[in-house]
Image (spheres, coloured by chain):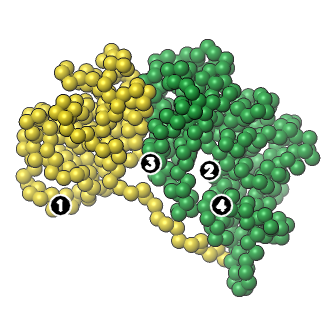
Amino acid sequence: MLLSIDTSAGTSVAVVDRDRGILAEYAEADTRRHAEVIGDLILACMSEADLAVTALSGVAIGMGPGPFTGLRVGIAAGQAFAFGAGKPVVPVISHDAIAFGHYAAGGTGPLLVVTDARRREVYWSTYRGADAAGLPERVDLPGLIRPDDLPSAVADYEHYVRLDADMVSAGAAGMLAETLFLHKRPFAGAEPLYLRSPDVTLPAGPKRVS
Amino acid sequence: MNMSAPLVSAPLVLGIETSCDETGIGIVRGNTLLANVIASSMDEHARYGGVVPEIAARAHLEALTPALTAALAEAGVALHELDAIAVTSGPGLSGALMVGVGAAKALSVALDKPLYAVNHLVGHVGADVLSESGPIDYPTVALLVSGGHTSLLLVRDLVSDVELLGETIDDAAGEAFDKVARLLGLPYPGGPEIDRAAIDGDPTAIRFPRGLSLPKDLEKHRYDFSFSGLKTSVARWVEQYRDTGAELPVADVAASFREAVVDVLLTKAIAACHAHGVPRLLLGGGVVANARVRQLAEVRCAANGIQLRIPPLSLCTDNGAMIAALGAQLIAAGHAASHLSFGADSTLPVTQIQA
């Protein structure tokens, strides 16, 4: 069983079990209240699943891509929960969770996942389809682009079913993590997928004031 | 979750501080310091001449778990032994604060320990309960000076009655040091560099203005500070001097600038002590590392019959131990834990000791 947290869009928290599926899932769609709601959502999921922390085998965390301030709240919370519980973290790519959910619900074939990156840009990922285990087969690493440029950036754009998501389900992220583990596939890296450098420019020399 | 205060007079508290560029994890038992681990991202900001919020926030996320591990090892305690967790919920940089807030909430739920969301500035005052000077006598005036804050407080009680007497209306004092250091071609952070450059300088060589000290300013801003005009004044002086082609007397400029900052800080702090009949002054914040601040504070306090308290430097700069200490004080006073729904508040007023 895993606690699962994704804050790459809104805030989503779930408890999942490989055999029994999603045992509890709570979400807040507001993309500016991650820090406020994260604690209560974790508590609600643990209460509803009626689980002791010791019963968990790890904490799945959506590593993005996502706008950084919110994304970090979920990663920080997931890492701290895992630290407190003495359990490992299981990082997954948030777009993979969307694709996993899509295929698990019966979707097939090429899929283009798009999420809001703010500042008039979007994050995007493409998938060929799902493999025998139900795991999405990603074409390339997630990218950052202006929405108008997306059709020309994606080869064979018309072949894809386009899925614009405004929420990433922690339940899907958790089940993705369980399935990856079951089939001995690698998890995502430990680094958040910010896909943007910090906004900063090197200062010019001091300006004259007189 | 458990929100009632643990019934212990010397609670074991872990404090998390991420309001600026220092990831601080501290552990205290009541007023006893057990661990004070600080991971700073200062070096990553140096080339930009100031703290870059996004760089600071990213660094917090990377530093948090290693700092937790190190603090527990240093204190020799296990997580399950903790009575409570405390975290800075403001004031500070939003994105940076949220890393600590998110982590603290999750840790609190994972361990089923009460969580105290506390005020960073009051934490700076609370730091001194951990020093070897014994309990703080109240009321006391507190002068907190750092790269992000310049505040004068009247503390009647650490956990229930803190009044903001004044604060900077533009730059923080530490920021002024950074900016003037740049003018003089000195690296970041500016405080220690100005301190070093000022050693051989004459503090009376140039009379730079003392912000908000004229009678008309004092009417409205008796205990407020302003360093923006001072910085511009130094810039103008430096430009005019350089225009003459002569070599800039860096030591004199540094010493005179520093004197202007320190003079106005202490003049207002001492005035507050007199006006409120409080013969006690407590200093806090990273700028207290400045040698001249400590020196002039000693001279002026002695001359005015004011008892001066300066916490050890490791407790003056941002740290998690002071947050833990304030949490422990709140618990000892019987305060209930914070509700889990608090957020990061970049402008949390100092009157709100606990969120």
Look at label 3 and name its amino acid.
Arg
The quarter of the displayed image where residue A147 is located? bottom left
In the rendered image, the vertical position of residue A92 relative to residue A68, given as above or below:
above
The quarter of the displayed image where residue B304 is located? top right
Q: Mark 4 or 2 closer to N-term?
A: 2
Q: Chain of mark 1?
A: A
Q: Position of residue A187 (x, y in %)?
A: 25, 39
Q: Position of residue B43 (x, y in %)?
A: 54, 56
Q: Chain of mark 2?
A: B
Label 3 neighbour load within 10 Å: few <14, some 14-19, many 20+: many
Q: Is residue B167 visible?
A: no
Q: What separation in Å lies between label 2 and label 1 (alpha carbons)?
A: 44 Å
In the rendered image, the vertical position of residue B344 relative to residue A13, given as above or below:
below
Q: Position of residue A106 (x, y in %)?
A: 8, 34
Determine the secondary structure under disc 2: loop
Q: What separation in Å lies between label 4 and label 3 (alpha carbons)?
A: 23 Å
Which mark is drawn over residue B148? 2
Which mark is drawn over residue B190? 4
Callout 3–callout 1 Cβ contact below 8 Å: no
Depth check, mark 1 against mark 4: the one in front is 4
Colour used to depict chain A in the structure image: yellow
